[in-house]
Amino acid sequence: MMMIIFLIVGLLIGGAVVDFVLQNITTVTVVFLSWQFESSLSLIIILAIVSGALMGLLWLLPGNIKKSLQISNLKKQNNRLEKELADKENKVESEKSETNLS
């Protein structure tokens, strides 16, 4: 059911983008530092949005990597502690059985 909703939303967004592109076909000149190029207004806006999204993702990347490393370290520590607990439980069980045999 969820996939159908995502498909419908994707189709609606795709249709809106196509409509946007068809309505903004005017050619504009973009000048940045020593670069100058001409393209349709819609392409320039879409490129600006995509580059902004990429910069946002790059901004968030170091924090995500740090959290991923912390999670990995905590999982290793958890596994080590679970192993230590199991070893101690086995030791207690063996001591109980030795005292019961005596």
Image (tube, grey):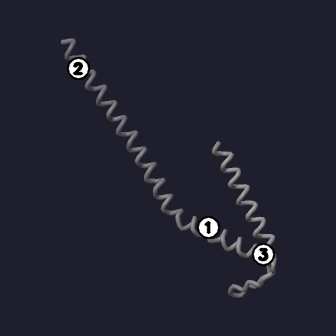
| Occupied quadrant, residue 96 | top left
Residue labelled with disc 3? 24
Which of marks 2 and 1 precedes in the sequence? 1
Residue 34 drawn above or below residue 22: below
Between residues 57 and 48, which one lies in front from this camera angle? Answer: 48
Image quarter of the C terminus = top left
Mark nearest the camera among 3 and 2 is 3
Residue 72 drawn above or below residue 92: below
Q: Is residue 89 left or right of residue 68?
A: left
- Residue 76, which numbered label? none
CA gap between label 3 and label 2 equals 81 Å
Between residues 97 and 52, which one lies in front from this camera angle? Answer: 52
Between residues 4 and 40, which one lies in front from this camera angle? Answer: 4
Residue 20 drawn above or below residue 84: below
For label 1, the SS is: helix
- Residue 53, which numbered label? 1
Residue labelled with disc 2? 96
Mark nearest the camera among 1 and 2 is 1
Q: Is residue 60 left or right of residue 38?
A: left
Which of marks 1 and 3 precedes in the sequence? 3
Residue 81 drawn above or below residue 73: above
Residue at 79%, 78% in the rendered image: 39
The image shows a total of numbered marks equal to 3
Mark nearest the camera among 3 and 1 is 3
Residue at 38%, 44% in the rendered image: 77
Image coords of residue 50 (percent x, y)? 67, 68
Q: Amino acid at mark 1?
A: Ala
Image coords of residue 2 (percent x, y)? 63, 45
Image coords of residue 99 (percent x, y)? 19, 17
The residue sitting at the bottom extreme is: 34
Image quarter of the N terminus = top right
